[in-house]
Amino acid sequence: MPILDEDIVENKDENALDQFSPTWSATPLQNFLTSIFLLVFLGGALTICSILNFNTFFSIILCSSVGPLGLSIARKLKMYP
């Protein structure tokens, strides 16, 4: 029995929905805790910059790298998806 084009299209649509549906999403509590975690992380970086008296350019570079680093740590701690 030949495979019809309509069958292929139906299967592609179902697989596409399954492929892009998230396994789990963040709850509002997880969003709140992650934002607090990132703020504390950024505050620590700013404190280190002020204690060690870094220049402005280095402080901007350090603090801009803190956000992605903190988010990756939060994901490893299973705080955020």
Image: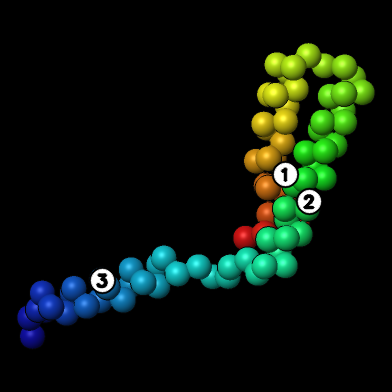
Q: Nearer the viewer, mark 1 or mark 3?
A: 1
Query: Of the numbered discs in the image, which one, if any, rests on residue 60?
Result: none
Query: Of the numbered discs in the image, which one, if any, rests on residue 12?
Result: 3
The answer to whether one can see residue 78 in this image is no
Residue most toward the top? 55
Q: Amino acid at mark 2?
A: Phe
In the foreground, 19 or 36 = 36
Q: Nearer the viewer, mark 2 or mark 3?
A: 2
> Residue at 67% of width from left, 47% of height from top?
72
* Number of numbered tags placed on the structure image: 3
Query: Of the numbered discs in the image, which one, if any, rests on residue 37?
Result: 2
**Secondary-structure class at tag 2:** helix
> Residue at 75% of width from left, 47% of height from top?
38
Of the residues under marks 2 and 1, which one precedes in the sequence? 2
In the foreground, 3 or 81 = 81
For the residue carrying disc 3, how many other residues have a C-alpha within 10 Å: few (<14), some (14-19), or many (20+)?
Answer: few
Query: Of the numbered discs in the image, which one, if any, rests on residue 70?
Result: 1
Q: Quadrant of residue 17?
A: bottom left
> Residue at 33% of width from left, 68% of height from top?
16
